[in-house]
Amino acid sequence: MVILLISALLGVSLLALEIFKLRRWMMPLMVMAFLAIIGGTFALWGMNENVMMQGMIVMDAYALRTTAVLAILALFWLLTQHQNIEKTGNSSDLYALLAFSFCGALLMTNFTNLVMLFLAIEILSIPVYVLAASNRSSLLSNESGFKYFILGSAASAILLFGIALLYGATGSFDLYTIHDALMSGTIAPLSWVGLAMILTGFGFKISVAPFHFWAPDVYQGAPTPITGWMATVVKGAAIFGMYRLFKGAFDGAMPHLEGILVIIIAITLVIANGMASIQSNVKRMLAYSGVSHAAFMLATMIIPGFDPQSIVLYVISYGISSLIVFSIMNQVGQTTGEELNNFRALSQENPFSAAAMTIGLLSMAGIPPLAGFFGKYYVISGLISTHPGLTIIMILTSVVGMYYYLKVIFAMYQKTSTPVVVEENNKVVLSLGIIALVAMMVAVQWM
Amino acid sequence: MIALSIFLIPLLTSFLLFNSKTGNAAKTALTSLILMLLVAIGGRVATAYGLTGTLSFPLISSIGFSFSLLWDGPAFLMVLLTIIAGLGIVYFSQDKEIHSSNRFYGWIMMMLSAMIVAFLAGDALLFYLCYEWALIPIFFLILKWGHGEHLSKVTMRFFLYTLFGSLFMMLSLLYVHQSMAAPSFDMNAMWAAGKALTAGEQGWVFAGLFIAFAVKMPVFPFHSWQPSTYDHAPIQGTMLLAAIMLKMATFGLVRWAIPMTAVGIAENGHWAILLSVISVVYASFMALTQKRLKMMIAYSSVAHVGMISAGILSNTDQGTVGGLFEMFSHGILAVAMFVVYAIIEKRYGHDRMQEMGGIRTAAPAFAFLTFILVMCNVALPFTSGFVGEFLLLQSLAHYSLVYTAIAGLSVILGAAYMLRGFQAMFLGGNTHAFKALSKNEKNILAIAVLLVIVLGVYPHSLLQLIQNVY
């Protein structure tokens, strides 16, 4: 409860700081709030389930773990991106919007009621629609915000419709009641339609095929720090919410949904990796690669049993690697551009940036012993006995993935006479991220 | 402790080299390698007096993944090869001016460290991790210090090809791992779990493992990355690939594939031995048609490795022992042969054999040393090549006499291409001024020749290390 209160008050206090002209306190306040949330989850670790607000939210082991992951990602995002946010001149609005969106992200991890889920999704998404369009002078950013808004609202509407249908079939918004209703005997056709619509809505939110079309345009158009936020915290929160819903409440229906999910995952892997390998714009390529990672995250849903370790590990390893990558890409993008050519010979003048980006990309590609490998490991080892065919598709598409990540690495280590020179301003934070990627191997057992 | 220090020394050296701006990188690397050699030999002696060299601590207990290093005979043999080959590579590179050399040696040391862990690993996942991780240093070595027009294309193909192969190994290992009641990647647990599978399952598990190893060795038809990569890589990179890196694959057969899936190989693994034998003959013929020395050595390496693979897969004691012995011998030979290539290439500026001649008149000592290496390559008795090849052929004979006869052809073909090459380069009239060998070049060839002969005359010195592998 305290954790949620902190996150909710954070946004309000950031706006208040702006009123009292205390802008320079915003960043420390946010850092302190995120640290307090991380500390809070550790303090409550191992606690019994605690249902709050008349059965609307619950603080259980899953909620604590995922809250900690989201707070760590948000903190890391803040530390790598705060200079860029402050450069824009309207940092208080942006920070406040981010804080509100973070509050929605936390709600996504601990709802026990479908109404709460819908509220959480809206609190999470609406600030991000604004953030995507926050670079008002850029046509692409406006397009990005608009597109995200229209498609996101449509997805929310479909999701809400699904929730309504499910309510019609089971007579309750409560996850436990729905769980019992779905577990007991036959499932009414109305529930199936509802489930399909909820799946569609979430498919939009986490951007898996065939609902992924918005992702490349929105990711490319939005300011890079915001893209980083969308790709990590927002996507992580959506997938965490989906996991709680589908593995927790829709248990009874999962055996029937499995076939659909397998098809979605397979199609997403093939399309996303195929499209990513023909992009010349690195940001767009990363957007498609993010879609393929969403497929891996979705694949954790069909691992038998409720064991969130795989999803938690995947989100945090993908999150930290992509934040490192987005951070370097932002530096390069501000100097020249985000095309593949702009990365040429980055290593010549900026060996640290090139090395950090390389490690981030290798982790995303799943090269051991980096964190991304263990993320993929848990998914594949969970699926190998039940879905061997899908694991082979995962492996083959991983090789395609390696190809487009390597293209960037190649560009960075080429030799030219006119290398790109960028400003390196957060070496310490990025080094911490790299250490985290390597140390994840040891940390896995506590997740 | 011994196992730990032996991989930590090169790793720390590589970090040191990456972070220092000045200083003599080659000397640092050389010192660290000599230290490793002393620790390895001292450790081996200490083990004989009862010190335990192994090490194990759990990393991820929920999946039974532990950082466990063994210190048994085969592992020691491969570590010894890694260190000796590494010494040869670094010692040889001293002569050459290499741009930004700190990083160059840093990558070499990091690669050695990854390969040492792969050889020492007593945990299947740890083996896999290092098998993959060793790709990163060699990738940068080729990309940054390689040469040639299509360098990035070649590097990309090499990297993706080998990565693609090893992912199948992961699938196989995971399949064995999840079949256990209490999942663990520990070597003995993996062996037992592999043996418990049906022959059909073992056949599939073996197929996955063999694809990974076959790409890396390489075995026909997975070899297409190899000639161009050897050609474009810096000579030190080629030596690392040929002398040590591919041994991870052949060693993987001995340590992981055979014990886990022996029944599967016997019943469903016929194709793998067939491919290995085809590989021997195909590579020998390819070597026969090569006009360039480097390519000839590359293909002769494929032929040797195919032989090792076929011998090991026939799964007799001689096969395993012969395979390990031949790995060691081939590692030393590969470094030495590429040194010969580098010496000639440096003086002629190219390596087209038919346009050379008469080196023997100009540099008789060099010709003599090279001749012994060539003899070892064609498995002449009293060289180390003979011992390994003989044991491997003997083992293969238990499996199939026809295959033995076909693979035995490679000895004849080997003699044909090696001697033809030697004749073209060293005999005949002197048409080109040939600068005398430097001290370093002479030393390294002399030591290689000495090793080759000592091992050929007294193979027992190594063989006693690797009896009773299982």
Image (cartoon, helix red, strand yellow):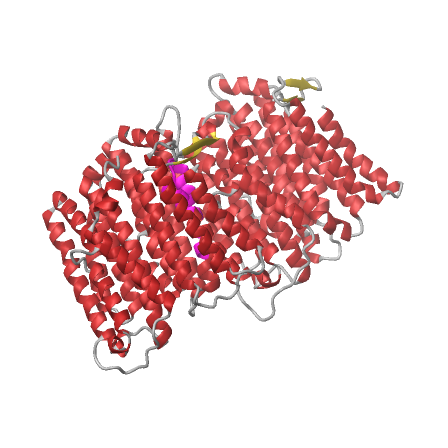
Q: Is residue B12 above or below residue A344?
A: above
Q: Nearer the viewer, residue A345 or B21?
A: B21
Residue A396 can be seen, yes or no = no
- Principal secondary structure, stretch drawn in magenta: helix
Q: Position of residue B231 (x, y in %)?
A: 36, 65
Outermost residue on the right side: it is A20
Image location (x, y in percent) of residue A107: 67, 30
Seen in the picture, residue B334 relative to A360 is either above or below; the reply is: below
What residue is at 70 percent from the left and 38 percent from the top? A101
Nearest the camera: B449 or A147?
B449
Please say whether residue A271 is one of the residues in the magenta stretch: no
State the residue in front, A11 or B170: B170
Instruction: Let me know if residue B294 appears in the view.
Output: yes
Q: Is residue B459 left or right of residue B298?
A: left
Q: Tell me if residue B118 comes above or below residue A198 in the rendering.
A: below
Nearer the observer, B82 or A61: B82
Residue at image location 52% in from the left, 57% down from the top: A409
Give residue A5's quadrant in the image.
top right
Q: Is residue B373 left or right of B19 when viewed as pictured?
A: left
Q: Quadrant of the C terminus of chain B?
A: top left
Residue B287 x/y as whole percent: 24, 65
Q: Position of residue B234 (x, y in %)?
A: 41, 64
Whether the magenta-drawn stretch holds residue B130 is answered as yes
Q: Which residues are magenta?
A: B114-139
Would you identify the image quadrant in which residue B357 lies? bottom left
